[in-house]
Image (cartoon, rainbow, N blue to C red):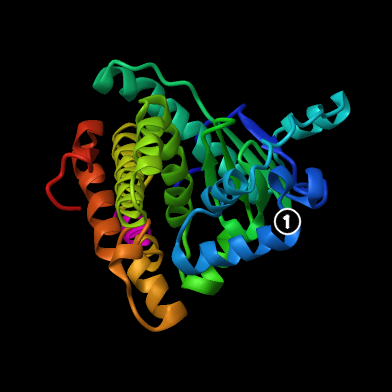
């Protein structure tokens, strides 16, 4: 993937090197949850494929905890966070984010009539605060709809290679584009509606709704890739194969088989390997946001 010529985003908040953030909440965690609880929820998230930020938010609601306090940052720290990254991983994240901005700012109004408001990407190392609670490296990348930010510990790219044998710039770009896809869903008003439905649904139905959300984000990542390539011609077939391999590696069925030796489809929250590949390719082939309506699809 030729990403070096992409425009770097101004919406990067680089908190790396600040230490393990996420400890500044009451009780050492999100909304009063203990750090031990958060670690356990992170582990459960890795095993089940559930976004740990969702698990933490649910546990916080059940425990009656408060929302995280707004972070107060001194001007020098804020200026440092906003400085353009100088390392390769930071520059890569900035340029991929910038490219998603350039693509979605153009195609979202054209395809949906909605204007695009860019997300901010927080780069961190180890742990930090998010509007959804404590962000920990074990969570993997996630989007927090409460503060409209994507959170990424850049060591996750190394984890992809080590744990899933997934490598390549476009595979990493797919991960970022997937999280930006959740922001697109938020802009379109989809996330709020789904969360309301999940609160009234049973566990199995809530999981099925989560799968539809995640598969849509995969499809939107494909829409971004198609439109980006049409304009910049920065990827080739080998790059597409990298994304396919990444999608296959993080399917719920494969993760469950690896972690527990058997598969429980009703517990899926992100979709099977086959589903994730199919929906990414649906978006990539069409380049159209409307092709990603997993909620109207008879089958995922």
Q: Residue at x 85, y 24 (%)?
A: 75
Q: Residue furthest bottom?
A: 261
The residue under the point 22% across, 41% down is: 295
x, y percent for residue 79: 80, 27
- Residue 240: where, in percent of width, then height? 32, 55
Q: Is 43 left, or right, of 230 in this rendering? A: right
Residue 278 vertical position relative to residue 146 in the rendered view, above or below: below
Can you give x and y, in whole percent of width and height, for residue 252 in the image?
A: 37, 65
Instruction: Report which quarter residue 83 is drawn in.
Output: top right
- The residue closer to the viewer here, 204 or 74, is 204
Asked whether residue 227 is in view, the answer is yes
Nearest to the observer: residue 121 or residue 146: 146
Residue 60 is left or right of residue 101, and the answer is right
Dot 1: few (<14), some (14–19), or many (≥20) neighbours within 10 Å? some
Residue 223: image quadrant is: top left
Residue that mark 1 sits on: 126
Q: Main secondary structure of the magenta part?
A: helix
Residue 157 in the image, given as x and y percentages of width and height? 56, 59
Please state the extent of the stretch shown in magenta in the rendering. 237-244
At a point 40% along the width and 62% down the height, the residue shown is 246
Residue 241 drawn in magenta = yes
Judged left or right of residue 106, residue 166 is right
**Looking at the image, which residue sits at the far left?**
298
Q: Residue at x 29, y 44 (%)?
A: 219
Residue 262 in which image quadrant: bottom left
């Amino acid at each position: 993937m030729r990403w070096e010529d992409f425009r770097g985003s101004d919406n990067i908040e680089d908190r790396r090197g600040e230490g393990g953030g996420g400890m500044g909440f009451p009780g050492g965690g999100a909304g009063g949850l203990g750090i031990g609880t958060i670690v356990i929820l992170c582990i459960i998230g890795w095993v089940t494929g559930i976004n740990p930020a969702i698990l933490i938010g649910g546990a916080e609601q059940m425990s009656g905890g408060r929302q995280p306090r707004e972070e107060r940052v001194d001007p020098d720290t804020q200026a440092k966070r906003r400085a353009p990254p100088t390392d390769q991983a930071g520059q890569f994240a900035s340029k991929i984010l910038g490219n998603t901005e350039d693509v979605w700012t153009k195609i979202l109004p054209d395809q949906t009539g909605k204007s695009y408001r860019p997300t901010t990407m927080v780069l961190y190392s180890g742990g930090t605060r998010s509007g959804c609670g404590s962000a920990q490296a074990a969570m993997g990348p996630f989007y927090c709809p409460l503060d409209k930010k994507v959170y990424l510990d850049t060591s996750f790219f190394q984890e992809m290679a080590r744990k899933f044998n997934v490598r390549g710039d476009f595979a990493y770009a797919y991960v970022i584009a997937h999280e930006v896809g959740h922001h697109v869903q938020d802009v379109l008003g989809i996330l709020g509606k789904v969360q309301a439905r999940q609160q009234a649904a049973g566990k199995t139905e809530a999981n099925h709704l989560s799968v539809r959300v995640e598969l849509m984000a995969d499809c939107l990542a494909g829409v971004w890739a198609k439109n980006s390539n049409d304009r910049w011609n920065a990827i080739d077939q080998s790059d597409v194969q990298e994304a396919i391999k990444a999608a296959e590696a993080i399917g719920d069925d494969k993760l469950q088989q690896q972690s527990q030796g058997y598969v429980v489809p009703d517990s899926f929250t992100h979709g099977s390997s086959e589903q994730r590949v199919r929906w990414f390719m649906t978006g990539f082939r069409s380049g159209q946001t409307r092709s990603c309506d997993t909620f109207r699809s008879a089958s995922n």
